[in-house]
Image (cartoon, rainbow, N blue to C red):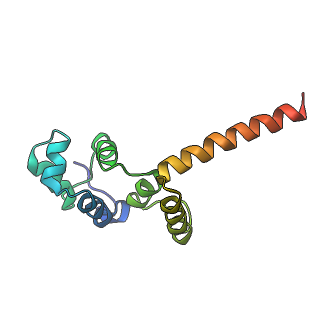
Amino acid sequence: MPRLPFPLEHYFDLRKLRKHCRRRGLNGSALGRLLGLSPGVMAYYLRGGGPLPLYWFRQVCAALELDPLEVCELLRLPVLDWGEVNRFRAACRRAGTTPFQALQDFLTVFVQEAREAKEEEGP
């Protein structure tokens, strides 16, 4: 396996991934079994033994039901100010929806309104 130019923690937040696993009541072995991997394989990745292949990262995100903002946090890609993200998540809880559903609803409404505005403008 090629060496990474920086330590794995530079690219990927293993601490947050382990937190998401605990939140779902899973350890590395249980998550591995859920994904059809041998028990030690996922534990190896969760210990930082190597970078998680993209296919398995996608499967992990789906199994843990991570929203897009949580995925960005794992990849250390700050999309928004974290204070805004926390307020967004709190608003979702108050509204009784998930962040994923709220983003999906927003995109649907935004696209519809943009389409209607374009139609009102005319050719």
- What is the x, y in percent for residue 35? 20, 41
Asked if residue 78 shows in the view, the reply is: no
What residue is rendered at 55% in x and 44% in y? 104
What residue is rendered at 82% in x and 35% in y? 118
Q: Quadrant of residue 18?
A: bottom left
- Identity of the residue furthest to the bottom in this view: 83
- What is the x, y in percent for residue 116? 79, 35
Left or right placement of residue 42 versus residue 89 in this view: left
Q: How many marks?
A: 0
Q: Quadrant of residue 56?
A: top left
Considering only vertical position in the picture, is 67 above or below 48?
Answer: above
Left or right placement of residue 111 versus residue 23 in this view: right
- What is the x, y in percent for residue 42? 17, 51
Q: Nearer the viewer, residue 108 or 74?
A: 108
Q: Nearer the viewer, residue 75 or 100?
A: 100
- Identity of the residue furthest to the top in this view: 123
Asked if residue 22 shows in the view, the reply is: yes
Left or right placement of residue 101 versus residue 5 in this view: right
Q: Nearer the viewer, residue 59 or 119?
A: 119
Screen quadrant of the C terminus: top right
What residue is rendered at 28% in x and 63% in y? 14
- What is the x, y in percent for residue 107? 61, 43
